[in-house]
Image (cartoon, grey):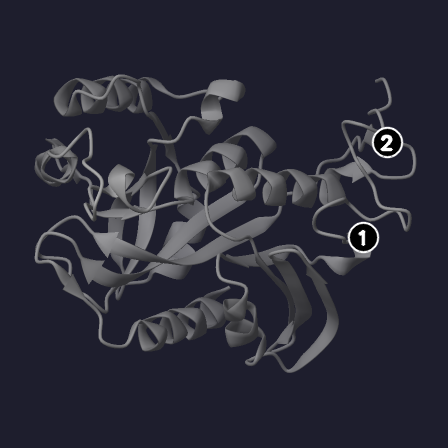
Amino acid sequence: MAKISETDLVLNPDGSVYHLNLLPKNISDTIIAVGDPSRVYMVSQHFDEVEFEMNKREFITHVGKYKGKRITVISTGIGTDNVEIFLTELDALANIDLKTREPKARKKKLKIIRIGTSGALQEDIPVGSHLVSDYAVGLDNLMNFYDLPMDDFEAGLAHDIQKKTGLPFMPYVVRGSELLRDQIGGTDMIKGNTVTCPGFYAPQGRILRLPIRYPKLLEDLNYYNKGDLWLTNFEMETSAYYAFGRMMGHEMLSANAIIANRIKTKFSKDPHKIVESLVKKVLDRV
């Protein structure tokens, strides 16, 4: 296989990957990903010890041990475009020899758990609850640039959601890791199906001063179902995690702290507490 060029795989002078500024030795097999850089400290404060730290742009990394298990926590910033950079460079650290610039013959499978905030799309999902995503529905356009395989059920769901919402493009649908969902989800977390949006305001049906093109989108997604499958929550990253998990061969799970209910128009008085309890729950189960 041909070497990957210097402009495709960009490395820093010390040999680290370009945006994350990490070397292969700086990551563990279990990764916790958070959007907000301040949440890195919320996770690592529980570590027995922190052995490594790196701050680069919005990508802050702490590596340490929790109850003897080596864990990496990295912040990604907001959105699927940031997740693409994060996961591509993370996979390069695991599965490309950075010295020869060639993919390794033996591929490593990482376990990656996103801990993020989300708004509920169904009235019966309470603010303060925790939800693990089974399927993700991507309303972003990232997968137009990749060859994501979808099974018949996922492709049918994507076509059906486009038809029922009247969107001018077809979303993509992909399932996350069943292994991690069963391991992390337990009986005290809601199993849901997450809609990933390319923005926080109009793409999630929020109106401030600007008129929005799809004023019924929130209602359409709230009412949408296919058999027992309902869409449960909105956020901005899960679809990219699940798509790259499938294409790269990693185990991916999105764990969501429900800090708002969009149907009841309720927002948490203490979102920090909801996220903190989710962090502890995930750490105890990884």
| Image position of 96 (left or right of 184) | right
User: 128 or 214: nearer the eye?
Assistant: 214
Q: Is residue 145 visible?
A: yes
Identify the disc placed on residue 23: 1
At a point 51% along the width and 64% down the height, the residue shown is 286
Identify the disc placed on residue 269: none
Q: Is residue 126 visible?
A: no
At a point 64% along the width and 62% down the height, the residue shown is 60
The residue singled out by tag 2 in the image is 101
Residue 59 % position (x, y): 63, 56
At a point 9% along the width and 57% down the height, the residue shown is 124
Q: Count neighbours of disc 2 (C-alpha within 10 A) and say few if under 14, some if 14 to 19, many if 20 or more.
A: some
Q: Count neighbours of disc 1 (C-alpha within 10 A) and say few if under 14, some if 14 to 19, many if 20 or more.
A: some
Judged from the image, the secondary structure of the residue bearing numbered disc 2 is loop
| Image position of 112 (left or right of 90) | left
Residue 105 % position (x, y): 79, 30
Judged from the image, the secondary structure of the residue bearing numbered disc 1 is loop
The numbered mark, 2 or 1, whose residue comes first in the sequence reads 1
